[in-house]
């Protein structure tokens, strides 16, 4: 399938990709729906003792688009994502970012790892966060703009070539102070389904 001339031109200008390379990309889209526990606990506090301490659940929907094949089964791509938090503080976020996907990890066909990051917007940030030692800390309510990071492992189903099962991590924070002076809005982990088309 041919990609639009405007996208081919944008790739050529922004990424130094020739029109022939842009045309070779085709039309590789994927959409992922996932659900799982979410927390407002600081990311490094979670990692310190592997204690997520959920404060709700999160439903996420991501749309990914491959942009440039980099070789060695690595693809530069873009992601648009929306999430909704339930149970506890109800909240909606939207995000857009750039990242990459690595296919055939360690030689396993139909197993891939992807990660994206970029700006995200929160309609109603939580009023409290869980810090180190599980201490409750007030949240900066003016920090609607934060960085998001998503990371995902996808494993293809053997009898459904376009479908994958996924494990995804979604995290929002200030990117070590780049946004909102050190704010950490929490993390979610989830299982879901991905459809590539």
Image: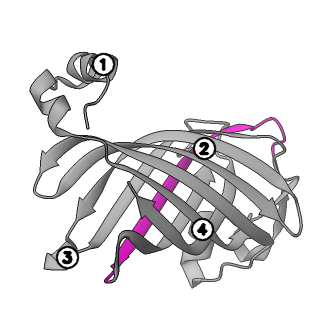
Picture coordinates of residue 171 (x, y %)? 58, 58
Tell me if residue 141 is in the magenta stretch: yes
User: What is the CA distance from the residue labelled 4 to the residue labelled 2?
Assistant: 24 Å
Local SS, label 3 = loop
| Start-end of magenta stretch | 138-158
| Residue placed under numbered mark 1 in the picture | 10
> Who is closer to the viewer here, 93 or 128?
93
Quarter holding the C terminus?
A: bottom left
User: What is the CA distance from the residue labelled 1 to the residue labelled 2?
Assistant: 29 Å
| Residue placed under numbered mark 4 in the picture | 34
| Residue placed under numbered mark 3 in the picture | 109
> Who is closer to the viewer here, 125 or 133?
125
Label 4 CA crowd tier, 10 Å (few <14, some 14–19, many 20+): many
Picture coordinates of residue 167 (x, y %)? 49, 74
User: N-terminal of the two: label 2 or label 3?
Assistant: 3
User: N-terminal of the two: label 4 or label 3?
Assistant: 4
Picture coordinates of residue 138 (x, y %)? 86, 54
Q: Quadrant of residue 129?
A: bottom right
| Residue placed under numbered mark 2 in the picture | 174
Please tell me which residue is depicted at 64% across the width and 59% down the height of the picture. Answer: 60
User: N-terminal of the two: label 1 or label 2?
Assistant: 1
Tell me if residue 86 is in the magenta stretch: no
User: N-terminal of the two: label 1 or label 4?
Assistant: 1
Q: In the figure, is residue 77 to the left or right of 13?
A: right
């Amino acid at each position: 399938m041919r990609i639009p001339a405007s996208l081919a031109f944008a790739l050529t200008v922004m990424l130094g990709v020739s029109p022939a390379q842009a045309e070779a990309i085709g039309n590789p889209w994927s959409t992922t729906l996932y659900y799982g526990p979410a927390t407002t606990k600081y990311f490094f506090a979670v990692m310190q003792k592997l204690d997520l301490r959920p404060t709700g659940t999160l439903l996420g929907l991501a749309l990914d688009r491959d942009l440039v094949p980099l070789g060695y089964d690595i693809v530069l791509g873009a992601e648009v994502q929306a999430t909704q938090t339930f149970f506890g503080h109800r909240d909606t976020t939207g995000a857009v970012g750039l990242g990459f996907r690595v296919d055939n990890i360690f030689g396993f066909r139909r197993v891939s790892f992807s990660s994206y990051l970029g700006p995200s917007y929160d309609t109603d940030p939580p009023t409290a966060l869980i810090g180190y030692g599980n201490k409750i800390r007030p949240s900066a309510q003016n920090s609607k703009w934060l960085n998001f990071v998503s990371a995902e492992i996808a494993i293809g189903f053997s009898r459904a070539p376009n479908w994958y099962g996924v494990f995804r991590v979604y995290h929002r924070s200030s990117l070590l102070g780049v946004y909102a002076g050190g704010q950490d809005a929490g993390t979610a982990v989830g299982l879901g389904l991905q459809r590539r088309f």
